Amino acid sequence: MVRFLLKRVLLAVSVLLAVSIVSFLLFFALPRDPVTGMCPKNCNAERLERVRTELGLNEPKAEQYANYMKGIFVGRDLGSAQGGKCEAPCLGYSYVNSEAVSDTFARVLPVTLNIVLPAAVLWLALGVGLGMISALRRGSLLDRISIGLTLTFASLQLYFVGAVLLLIFVYHLKILPTPRYVSLFDNPVEWARGLVLAWVTLALLFSAIYARLSRAQMLETLSEDFVRTARAKGMAKRQVYGRHALRAAITPIVTIAGLDVGGALGGTVITETTFGIQGLGRTAVEAVRQGDLPTIMATVLISALFVVIANMVVDLLYAFIDPRVRLG
Amino acid sequence: MGRSKSAPSGGPDRPSVPEQRSGEGPYLQVKDLGVRFDTEDGVVRAVDGVSFAVERGRTLGIVGESGSGKSVTSLAILGLHSAKRATITGEIFVGGRQLVGLPEEQVRRLRGRDMAMIFQDPLSALHPYYTVGRQITEAYRVHHPRAGKREARQRAVDMLGRVGIPQPAKRYDQYPHEFSGGMRQRAMIAMALVNDPDLLIADEPTTALDVTVQAQILDLLADLQAEFHSAIILITHDLGVVSQVADDVLVMYGGRAVEHGSVEQVLRRPQHPYTWGLLSSVPSLHGDPDADLMPIKGNPPSLINLPSGCAFHPRCRYAGRNGDRSFTEVPELRPAGEEGHLVACHLPAEERTRLFAEDIANVGVAAG
Ligand SMILES: Nc1ncnc2c1ncn2[C@@H]1O[C@H](COP(=O)(O)OP(=O)(O)OP(=O)(O)O)[C@@H](O)[C@H]1O
Ligand code: SF4
Ligand SMILES: [Mg+2]
């Protein structure tokens, strides 16, 4: 088990390193000069050159990269134009927003977390629950309705559903405020009212996918020999389904859920854009558009970190659920 | 019940199921069993009018090609068909209780307690995520709700030991994938026997195992039967296995019984052309391993559209010998001559005997 863990952690670290190098290189492969983004008007060559030197963009790429990584682990001095000393983990200073990237993240990261985590709870509960019931009542009216609904929602687009919900609840019925992020600790009611549309939109679309997946998984599991064995032992159906079938059916869903949540934490670009909420996703997109290297690097790294962590959690859960993984 | 119970706690834990045992007659009696599935393609008559009986301490072998309805029959006895998809007709008496049409809850209480089943592939039949011991304990506690954890565990360990698994206490905590195929099947048997059932159905229990292990498992079943005095149904493709362990044999074709009798009768003096075909395709029963095998030509029949008359007629060499009866009239299962020997074939008894002697036995089958 310890070796298993150690291997996963090593793997995770190398993945993150690789991601950081690749995104660094990709950035410079872009056919645009990051500095132009920073002085839209009255830019003469001399000024551009000065900014470039200040940002350290004239140094060799390897050195820039080394400096960046050094900042993350031990901190570094960014020079007076960029807020001076930057403590570890230093993510740099935004070329565009005139603030340390870590400050930007302190603002936008909670937003995305608060969108994704409650939505994930909703979509998992709704999707898996519906899928399981559908499977157990295969062919019933409920099953058929659920198939129809899930098929519809799975084929809809986030921005469409989001826009419709916005139109109904915010502009028409006016029972919800324009979506925004309020800290849960400041005002729980407003927190929920401000984000509920984002949760519901994500949950509707994702739960449709999860319902279909869970139904298929459960149906497959119900035809497994070990389910028949459990029934042959004289166990009641409830026990058979709850204990034997559910546990086997849920395993692959755990994997996919982990990866989906991990991915969503890296940014829910469309949701944030649809509802005009500034989270990780929108920040990332804007950073790319503006050529804001430090912010891009940070968003990429953080998204990658989420995915890597999600993977590790899934692996651990898997090992916990399936003894064959644990021992094999 | 006239036999020693090996459960540590004896009988008091048994939930009350109306005990209306006749005390007389075979433990299992199946009368005119029919199992029908309504599918999109049509009605599948998987079992049609099958009757047989098994007494305690005796073993009935059920043989027949793939798809002949053997498993469907055994699942019907345990009441494991979905009530929604399968229509079951006829009567099934287990220990005197008629089970067809009984509410699920009442059948459930007998399942695993009075009647238990061993499946073909023990790897897929055991839950991969639970320890072997836990799965056995669970089988015990379902029917002994008042048994404590420790008692149930002890019982499971005892059973593991009884079926010949070394270091049963240690094996208890292992998972199915840590067992070898043979050990897994032993564990399955331990699980099936943990409640000391009176009826054990083994559906191809050795097919997934290699030959040496097969023999061990069959020996084990025989030993356990001698000890527990249970009625056993052994389903198999392997006539060699039948000849070793069964007392009686039922031959099924297309969901129907075509021949029924003692092992001696059915394997030595078979009366049905299909049984002849089965016997001729088993090398182990030939005196001479090089003798020409006579596998049955053609494919098993469609159960949705069974051939008219005798379902075997498209594949039967002798179908033309009975006018058009073989093509139009379903042969009933009738006494074949000897006491207890039944056969469903239009051929006159003398002709059957003669044909068997001339066409089949001289190839070496009867010498088996
Ligand atoms: N739930 C079901 N729905 C429809 N048809 C079924 C169902 N279960 C079994 N059948 C059909 O019933 C027939 C008999 O199946 P069964 O499993 O009893 O065969 P078998 O004699 O056990 O064969 P094998 O030797 O391959 O195990 C098969 O044609 C099968 O397709
Ligand atoms: S009834 Fe006719 S077709 Fe059927 S087995 Fe007998 S001879 Fe063959
Ligand atoms: Mg079968």
Image (cartoon, helix red, strand yellow):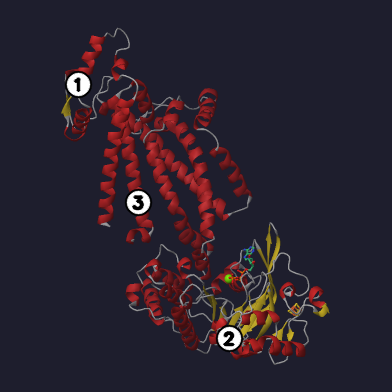
What's under tag 1, amino acid-wise?
Answer: Gly
Q: In this rendering, is residue A7 above or below B96?
A: above
- Tell which tag, 1 or 3, sits nearer the viewer: 3
Looking at the image, which is closer to me, B211 or B245?
B211
Which quadrant of the structure image shows residue A20?
top left
- The answer to whether residue B96 is seen in the rendering is no
Looking at the image, which is closer to me, A180 or A188?
A180
Helix or strand or loop: what does disc 2 sit on?
loop
Left/right of residue B160 with respect to residue B267 in the rendered view? left
Q: How crowded is mark 2: few (under 14 residues within 10 Å), some or many (20 or more)?
A: many
The number of discs equals 3
Q: In this rendering, is residue B354 above or below A201?
A: below
Which quadrant of the structure image shows residue B360?
bottom right
- Please provide percent x and percent y for residue A7: 27, 51
- Please provide percent x and percent y for residue B196: 48, 80
Q: How far apart, in angstroms, are the residues tagged by discs 1 and 3?
A: 41 Å
What's under tag 3, amino acid-wise?
Answer: Asp
In primary-sequence order, the first of circles 1 and 3 is 1
Left/right of residue B224 with respect to residue B349 in the rendered view? left
Give the residue number, with chain letter if any, for mark 1: A83
Q: How far apart, in angstroms, are the residues tagged by discs 2 and 3?
A: 55 Å
Give the residue number, with chain letter if any, for mark 2: B286
